[in-house]
Image: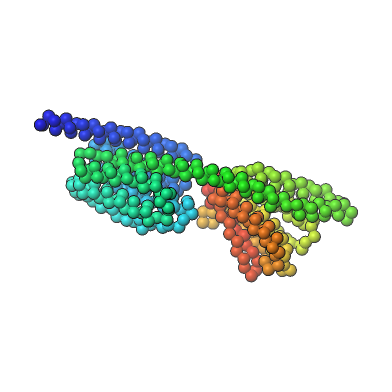
Amino acid sequence: MDFDTIDFNNVITIANLICTFVSMILTGVVMLTAIQMKLHNIRMGWFIASVCLVMGGLMFQLSATLVYSRVFYALFPPFFALYFIETERETGQKWDGVFWTTVQTLFAVLVLILVIFGNDEFFIYGAFLLQYIVAIIMLLFSSKKIGASIGFLLGTMFPVIASFIGMADDRLHFMGLGITVMLLIIFFGYQMDMERDLLNKQVELSENKVSLLMEQIHPHFIYNSLQQIALLCDEEPESVKPAIYDFSSYLRKNFEALTNEKMIPFLQEMEHVDAYVKLSRILPSRNFTIKKEFETTDFNIPALTVQPLVENAIYYGIGMSSEGDEIKIITQEEGGYVIIKVVDDGRGKKTELSTQKKHKSVGTKNVKTRLKILCNGEYTLNKTPDGTESIIKIPLDLAKNH
């Protein structure tokens, strides 16, 4: 009987070692892949931190130091909750997971107390089980649809099973393996989400190019520009050559922007703005001035984002009103963002025709789309009694790193 018992204990020891060793290899692969990924956002940061905790737990488990390994395992669920919060935020939802993170932290403290001051394996694994039951409840109560959370839910089942196994037989230490499988499932789900988002962005950007072409190269503006240049031949012959250069520069930069799917230097976008402003000055319209207040210019921006806003300010701001004659272009860094503002002091909102409103809305829609796809930027419009303020916000790290 003793011989059989010793043999069975050896089998369990070998099984524990194999599971721990395999888990370390899998976790190491996930960690290296995650670190080498190009996209390192806050969400991925919490994921890598979670992987590091599991790796630490596995290393102590491999050296048969179960107390320390369980300390690392106990800290994993709060970090997983933080990772899930960022997952929710990246989908544009406003679900607040602070409550769940706090609950998981309290349970982690409970596990740590049981691990450090207690020696009852049943209650220790029971506390682990409660952590993952809370995680499941968190997933079910989140703003995600069940279909979108199925990977998280499926992954959470494995540490739940490992907890039950530990409660049934305290010699079986499969918690590290259970968490590792959970990380693998979540990581593959993350990769699938990235591939799907990338495909959607490519489709949306392609559709945006067509819309942008129709909106930017509108025949009415080109016709008026050429007609006015023709009139200059009789009235101001010396202005014809510069006007043709401005017209050529405007068209060239539009076509360049349509084929450019990357960020460009802000000053390059301002060259396009300047070409458009010069061209606009030869057309019959009210006089206006452009004032530039640049606190920063060393950043990148999607092409054709500032120029359409200046166009709106010229023709639908001061151009549609008898009041105002100044347009300001302002740049600054604030709160982790690069902020670009186009401000006019006109009030032409009430006199806009339906066709003009449609042209204006298409232009701002294109700006929003390009900002969102290329740099996760934002566009907002503020209308006041004193004029209109268009605001672009681009995360500082994305504006500086392209």
Q: Viewer-proximal residue, 289 or 118?
A: 118
Q: Residue at x 35, y 55 (%)?
A: 100
Q: Split into 4 quadrants, where in the image is the N terminus?
A: top left
Q: Viewer-proximal residue, 278 or 218?
A: 218
Q: Residue at x 20, y 43 (%)?
A: 168
Residue 309, placed above or below residue 64: below
Q: How is the image coloured?
A: rainbow
Q: Viewer-proximal residue, 58 or 292?
A: 58
Residue 173, placed above or below residue 80: above
Q: Split into 4 quadrants, where in the image is the C terminus?
A: top right
Mark yes or no: residue 292 visible.
no
**Image side of residue 285 versus residue 101, left or right:** right
Residue lying farthest to the right in this orientation? 234
**Image side of residue 21 versus residue 330, left or right:** left
**Image side of residue 316 versus residue 70, left or right:** right
Residue 93 percent coordinates (x, y): 46, 56
